């Protein structure tokens, strides 16, 4: 079945790597070691993305488990720096998004996303308007790799699973998309993506990726 849609994850697919200055500030504010911080940061991240927690409940939960406490001012600062951690976008991938849409494909974002980062993106990322549909986990109380969140996106795009390609940086989310019948590739950068599209016989249906060297 020919492709009719490309569905993108946001974090580490459309976004760049975590912003190092923001991470440094998170460690400074929290006063936690990198190891303790990372263990607690990811322990409840899916609850944040599902909307079970928000910034004002996520960070106190981390503090409780780490045996510390954060003042209201520190919580606000942690929320701000956590948003900035993920707010750098990849210009190469954004250029390809435009090429994919111009080729006639439908495009969407399907992302596990907490409400604080989402609010920042809506306020600052006008390029979100390019997409035919946007699926954010915190608004559906669903997270990848639950089948229902992929099926929701396919329904909104009005495409069959085997007509859609999904790109994600996490293997469990790629496997979740494959389980509902979608084409899905693990994203490890532009060059790797181009090679994988060739390997899977999908490259001929999509515009070429931009040369990342031109954006350095």
Image: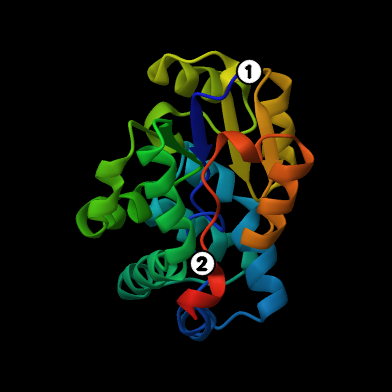
Q: Position of residue 113 (x, y in %)?
A: 45, 46
Residue 212 is labelled as: none
Of 39 and 22, nearer the camera is 22
Q: Is residue 104 visible?
A: yes
The percent position of residue 8, horizontal first and vertical second, equals: 51, 42
First-in-chain label (2 vs 1): 2
* Residue beneath disc 1: 162
In the rendered image, residue 54, in percent from the top left (x then y), is placed at: 40, 48
| Labels in figure, total | 2
Q: Quadrant of residue 162?
A: top right
Residue lying at 32% horizontally and 68% vertically, measured from the top left: 76
Tell whether label 1 touches label 2 (CB within 8 Å).
Answer: no
Q: Which residue corresponds to mark 2?
A: 16
Would you say residue 90 is visible in this rendering?
A: no
Q: Quadrant of the N terminus?
A: top right
User: Which of the pair 141/163 is nearer the observer?
Assistant: 163
- Binning the other alpha carbons within 10 Å of mark 1 as few (below 14), some (14 to 19) or many (20 upward) gives some
Instruction: Pinpoint residue 61: horizontal percent, then vertical percent.
Output: 53, 56
Given the current orientation, which residue lies at the most extreme front position?
A: 204
Give the residue displayed 73% in from the left and 39% down from the top.
172
Residue sitting at x 66%, y 35%: 202
**Callout in the foreground (2, 1):** 1
Residue 121, above or below 164: below
Where disc 2 sits, the SS reads loop
How packed is label 2: few (under 14 Cα within 10 Å), some, or many (20 or more)?
A: some
Q: How is the image coloured?
A: rainbow
Residue 48, compared with residue 165, is above or below; it is below
Label 1 residue SS: helix
Q: 156 and 67: which one is in front? A: 156
Residue name at image x 34 percent, y 49 percent = 118
Answer above or below: position of 3 versus 185: above
Say left or right for 164 vs 109: right
């Amino acid at each position: 079945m020919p492709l009719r849609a490309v569905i993108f994850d946001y974090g580490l697919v459309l976004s760049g790597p975590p912003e190092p200055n923001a991470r440094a500030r998170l460690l400074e504010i929290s006063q936690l070691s990198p190891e303790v911080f990372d263990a607690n940061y990811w322990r409840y991240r899916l609850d944040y993305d599902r909307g079970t927690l928000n910034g004002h409940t996520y960070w106190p939960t981390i503090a409780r488990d780490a045996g510390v406490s954060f003042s209201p001012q520190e919580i606000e600062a942690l929320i701000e720096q956590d948003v900035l951690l993920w707010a750098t976008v990849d210009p190469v991938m954004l250029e390809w998004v435009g090429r994919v849409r111009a080729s006639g494909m439908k495009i969407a974002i399907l992302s596990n996303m907490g409400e604080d980062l989402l609010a920042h993106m809506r306020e600052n990322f006008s390029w979100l308007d390019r997409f035919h549909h946007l699926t954010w986990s915190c608004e559906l109380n669903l997270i990848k790799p639950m089948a229902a969140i992929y099926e929701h996106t396919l329904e909104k795009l009005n495409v069959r699973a085997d007509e859609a390609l999904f790109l994600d940086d996490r293997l469990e989310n790629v496997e979740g998309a494959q389980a509902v019948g979608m084409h899905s590739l693990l994203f490890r950068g532009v060059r790797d993506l181009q090679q994988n599209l060739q390997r899977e016989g999908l490259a001929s249906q999509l515009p070429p990726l931009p040369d990342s060297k031109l954006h350095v």
